Image: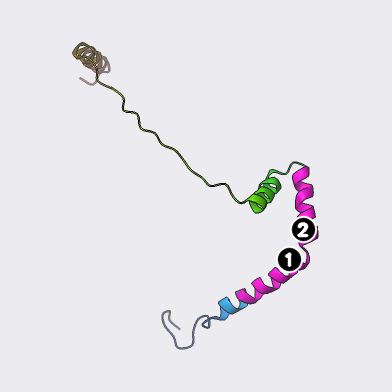
Amino acid sequence: MRGGYRQGAGRKRGFAAKSAEEARRVFSETVATEITPIAKALITKAKKGDVRAIKEILDRAWGRPSQSAEITYRPMDLSISKEASYRIAKRTVEEYEKSNFI
């Protein structure tokens, strides 16, 4: 057999979606009935210092904090004097000559 399109080959339409939907429903029902021991276990971990458990509790109880970054722009004067630029150029040429590239 060769690859490519073949009549009837591949996953049947909607099959994975239907099974995933059923799995979510079963999982959701199970969690709903067992929520108290799950919450208690999470709180116990948080009290012992488990950072991930603490974060999870805070995120679920008060929501995740919004992320924002404030960027401020302050123009800076980067100009240099003519004398300073000559000194920099002279030093650059001297270092180039010392480096045996000539």
The residue tagged 2 is: 38
Q: Is residue 51 left or right of residue 5?
A: right
- The spot of residue 8 in percent (x, y) is 49, 88
Magenta stretch encompasses residue 30:
yes
- The spot of residue 57 in percent (x, y) is 69, 50
Q: Residue 31's mark? A: 1
- The spot of residue 55 in percent (x, y) is 66, 47
Task: Establish if 1 lies above or below 53.
Answer: below
Q: Where, by quadrant of the figure, is residue 2 drawn?
A: bottom left
Task: Establish if 38 lies above or below 70.
Answer: below
Q: Where, by quadrant of the figure, is residue 29 drawn?
A: bottom right
What's the amino acid at mark 2?
A: Ile
Magenta stretch encompasses residue 37:
yes
Q: Which residue appears at 61% of the width and 74% of the height?
A: 20
What's the amino acid at mark 1?
A: Val
Task: Establish if 5 lies above or below 92.
Answer: below
Mark 1, residues whose alpha carbon is within 10 Å: few (<14), some, or many (≥20)?
A: few
Which SS type dominates the magenta stretch? Answer: helix
Element under label 1?
helix
Q: Is residue 74 left or right of residue 52?
A: left
Q: Name the residue nearer the viewer: 67 or 78.
A: 67
- The spot of residue 70 in percent (x, y) is 44, 38
* Marks 1 and 2 in Cβ contact (< 8 Å): yes
Q: Residue furthest front?
A: 62
Range shown magenta: 21-47
